[in-house]
Amino acid sequence: MVLPRRGVRVREIDGEGVTYDLAHHSIGYLNRLALAVWTRLDGQTSSARLAETIAEACQEDLDEVERYVEETLDALLEAGLADVLLERSGS
Amino acid sequence: MTAFAAEGARTRTAARSRRPARADLGARPSKRLAGDTPYGDAYRIGPLALSLRTTDIRLRRDFHGLYADYAVAAAPPDALLVSVSKRRSPRTLRRTFHISVDGEERFVVASRRAVLPHVEWAINGAAVSTLPGYFQIHAAAVVRNGAALILPAGPGSGKSTLAAGLIHRGWSYLSDEFALIDPQTLHACPFPKALCIKHGSFDRIRRLGLAFSSDQDYVKGVKGRVRFVDPRQLGPQAVGVAAPVRWIVFPKSVGSAAPRLERISRARAAYELARVSFTLARFRGGSLDLLADLAAGAECLVLHAGELSPTCDAIEAQVRRDERGRADSPRRTRSVQRAATPEPSARLCGLSGETAAAARSRDALLRGLAACLAGRPQRVTDKWHHLGLWDRAACLACDLGLGAFLAEALEREGLCTPPSAAATLAAYRRHVAARNAYLETRLRPVLDALTEGGVPFLLLKGAALNASLYGRRDLRGMCDIDLLIHPGDAVRAGQRLTAAGCRAGREHVRPGFFPRFYFEREYWTPDRPPVRLDVHVRPFRPVLYASTVPPDALWDQPQRVELAGSSVLIPHRENMLIHLCVHAACHGLEHLRWTHDIHRFLESNGAALDWYDIERKAKAWRLALPVRRALESVRQTFGATGGVNEDVLSRFDVPAAWLDRLALDQSPHDASRPVRHIVTDVLSLPGWRDRRDYLLATLLPAGSHMASWYSRRHHGWMAAAHALRLMRPLVGRFARTAEPAVR
């Protein structure tokens, strides 16, 4: 499960997004689909479910969106803009 | 599918700040200031004030050739001190030029041709930290019809050449290296440095018929040969005024292909702007909103540039299309949406938009600043932190001459200051120290001349406070030195000062007007830059006080203090407080710095003050009204200090005559309301003969005075000078001058 890292702000402009990492003063750009992924990150929804929701909302091919969601999540994690939420044992 | 792009777009300030500081002005002022015949000039280029100090005549001439229109009489307290010194290696005998800004060495170059470009470069580098109130983007900026176009790009992308091409077509110039964006209005503001053109574009500039400032090639490091274009020579309205940004054009390449423009999304444009921003970290989260709002209010384009002329054609065609489209489009109002929408930072700390906007106002910042200086900074600084106002507050404090006091107050309370604001305050403090050191050094021979000539004097205001109250150089800045002499010594003091190389300032309306009617005479030391001395024969400007305050009013029991290695006199404690209060009141109590002086004076001397003596003198000299107003203002601004309570204030509750109130109310407006000034002065004079002489002098000034109103000499020049003088009441409404019309 992935959720946005604290201290990262996003501003939507015309359906796309710009991120600002308050800790590192770095800025990023999110295209429409990346913004759609970002806005649905809540630490509870799986990537598969995320892809289904986006494919349905954007009326895109599910396989392509799934691949795209995986790539986006990797990029967000690599850029330090999102965190993996580890499930606690026993909970 | 391009999914995501994230790139650390850190500011360059961090990298620049790592440059080792090899020299520090504060550490060795005497050595620098004692140089042989240093030529210096002061300039204000857009919002940046600077003072160039060098012994190199050619550099001074070249720099002045580019910025003559921006020269000012004296460097303001916030001016950058740019110094260029020539040194010769004792081992190799090789000559090098050392370029420093505010005491920090920025460049060392061997070639004379490299000096001017590196001075420019050093100023640009320093501007990043000196102009913290602006969001700074590496871009050229031009303006036409009240709409700005910025060309953000890194070095070597041709933005200066493009800007020159557009100026040639009727655009007005705002800036070359920096687009200065006002964070409140999102307007691009002018910073009209000379355009620096690299050798690859020399022919393009020549083909347009544009002239370089000189035919000399300069050398700018790895960029190679460069030349400068003076924007003032490009057209009659070459330098524009602040305007909202309507076009953001990213020049991507320069080649021979046909130029084309393609739109990019506004989010992409905001991201690209961030990559070439110098102040991303300084504005923190506010950067995101600022860049997003900037992009949202503009047309965002990428320019694949070709030859200069077709490229300018393509830009202008696009601009015309957008202007036609904008005329029918609601997008036109986008830039004003920023003010109406609650700002994200305000939302984060739970304030409504209206409350946040109120907190950002100048008045609110002034109140916060006063609270900090009064020793109650915690709540205020929390608010500044939440609303991202630290940089504005630090900048405002420096503008008001209180930056060093703010830094001191924060240090005293152990409060953490954001790095950018801390850097601003620290730089200001260093600057105050350097400037005060310079003034004191230049003051010494003047004081010696007066002492040798047997002219007794008292130091007043800033110099007196620095010598007695503050006791250190890096707290309170001084713009000039105020001396009080006896009226009978006015002629002798003038002779001694002239013999010491000082030159008198602007002539009074008639010989003898000073000291009979006017309270001070201005002198300038022979130094470069010169230091202004205000020689007072009376402590206060209103003519009324010439008859109510005795000539020896501040002279009883003067205190002896040390200043610049000399022993000098300042007024006694009670007299000093009266002078500070009346002086502040005569300026309308509008300067926080002066009310802060009174606050600090009361804090330090309050317990020892003889309020009975102050009351007695104030009443006898008809100064109770200004003293009460000043003390009340200090109490309102800084709280109860130095034992000033209702009982103390009630001591000065005496009915004031209508003339006292008129003189005091008029005094702050002497410059803007000259007719009322003359009427008030005439009413204030005691006898008909004085009134007649005063009116004759002000209505029919001598030729020596009129010469300063009109510089040309031809048949009938006096009539022209009188016409200009009579127009002063009209022009004065728009002129930013505090100089009285009658002196």
Image (cartoon, rainbow, N blue to C red):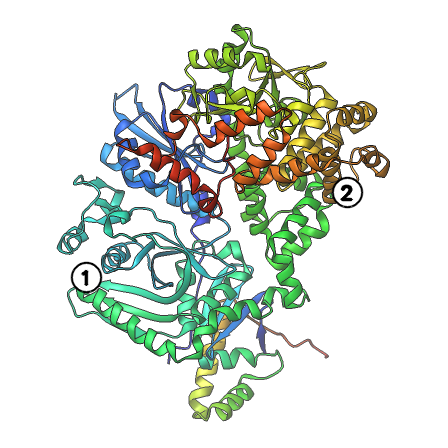
> Could you tell me which secondary element the residue under label 1 belongs to?
helix
Earlier sequence position, callout 1 versus callout 2 = 1
Q: Tell me how far mark 1 sits from mark 2, CA to CA.
A: 62 Å
Query: Compared to B332, does B52 lie above or below?
Result: above
Amino acid at dot 2: Gly
Query: Compared to B306, does B716 lie above or below?
Result: above
Q: Nearer the viewer, residue B53 or B10?
A: B53
Is residue B475 at all visible to an observer of this figure? no
Q: Which mark is residue B308?
A: 1
Chain letter for mark 2: B
Label 1: how many residues lie within 10 Å, few (<14), some (14-19) or many (20+)?
many
Chain letter for mark 1: B
Q: Which mark is residue B447?
A: none
Q: Nearer the viewer, residue B75 or B405?
A: B75
Task: Locate residue B83: give its quadrant.
Answer: top left
Identify the residue at horizontal 68%, vertical 41% (top origin).
B373
Amino acid at dot 1: Leu
Residue B508 in the image: state x and y as whole percent: 46, 26
Q: Nearer the viewer, residue B113 or B180?
A: B180
Query: Compared to B210, does B541 lie above or below?
Result: above
Left or right? Give the position of B30 relative to B247. Answer: right
Circle 2 is placed at which residue position?
B639
Left or right? Give the position of B479 relative to B259. Answer: right
Residue B112 in the image: state x and y as whole percent: 24, 32
Q: Nearer the viewer, mark 1 or mark 2?
A: 2
> Could you tell me which secondary element the residue under label 2 belongs to?
loop
Label 2: how many residues lie within 10 Å, few (<14), some (14-19) or many (20+)?
some
Residue B228 in the image: state x and y as whole percent: 24, 45
Question: How many marks on residues?
Answer: 2
